Amino acid sequence: MKKWLIKSDPEEYGWNEMQKDKTTLWTGVRNYQARNNMRAMKKGDALLFYHSNADMAVVAICQVVGEAMPDPTATEGDWSCVEIKAVKKLKQPVPLAQIKSHKDLKEFGLVRNGRLSVMPVSEKEWEAIMTMAGEY
DNA sequence: GCCAACGTTGGC
DNA sequence: GCCAACGTTGGC
């Protein structure tokens, strides 16, 4: 089972909406690297739900329930989406500043390439974040 | 609100 | 195929 991080702008679609919807199609990704990451997702993979912009923190955990399929919101081009479900809110959100200052997270995608919206998370990185979230 | 970083586009 | 110009994202 792999782990990933997905970004959302809470002003557009944040954790509140996600939790209300229970499951959603993660549409609107228009970046090849992010799309390819979504295509590599398998059912059951775990996702960190990150708020960009106003919030700037990992706030919750989601899970992949439907593997890559054509993005219904794409009018042209070869784009994909996955179906995800809300799992749980973290005990404590993990702010970006804390992630940036963690010694084991220097190579983390969020730190290295701030603009990628879907990225893999290693076991080590996952554990570091879960620890900071008070989940271990 | 500004700007750095990155991706994409288009001219050559 | 290179690279300048431009647009977008997202942190500060």
Image (cartoon, coloured by chain):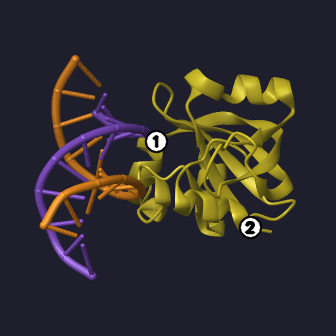
Chain colours: A yellow, B orange, C purple
Q: Which residue is mark 2?
A: A2
Q: The residue under label 1 is which amino acid type? A: Leu
Name the secondary structure under disc 1. Answer: helix
Residue A76: which disc?
none
Numbered disc 2: what chain?
A
> Which badge, 1 or 2, is on the more N-terminal residue?
2
Name the secondary structure under disc 2. Answer: loop
A25 and A107: which is toward the camera: A25
Place residue A53 in its image quadrant. Answer: top left
Given this view, does label 1 or label 2 mark the residue nearer the observer? Answer: 2
- The quadrant of the picture occupied by the N terminus of chain A is bottom right
Residue A115 seen in the current view: yes
Q: The residue under label 2 is which amino acid type? A: Lys
Query: Is disc 1 in contact with disc 2, using a CB cutoff of under 8 Å?
Result: no
Q: Residues within 10 Å of mark 2 (few under 14, many from 20)?
A: some
Residue A127 seen in the current view: no
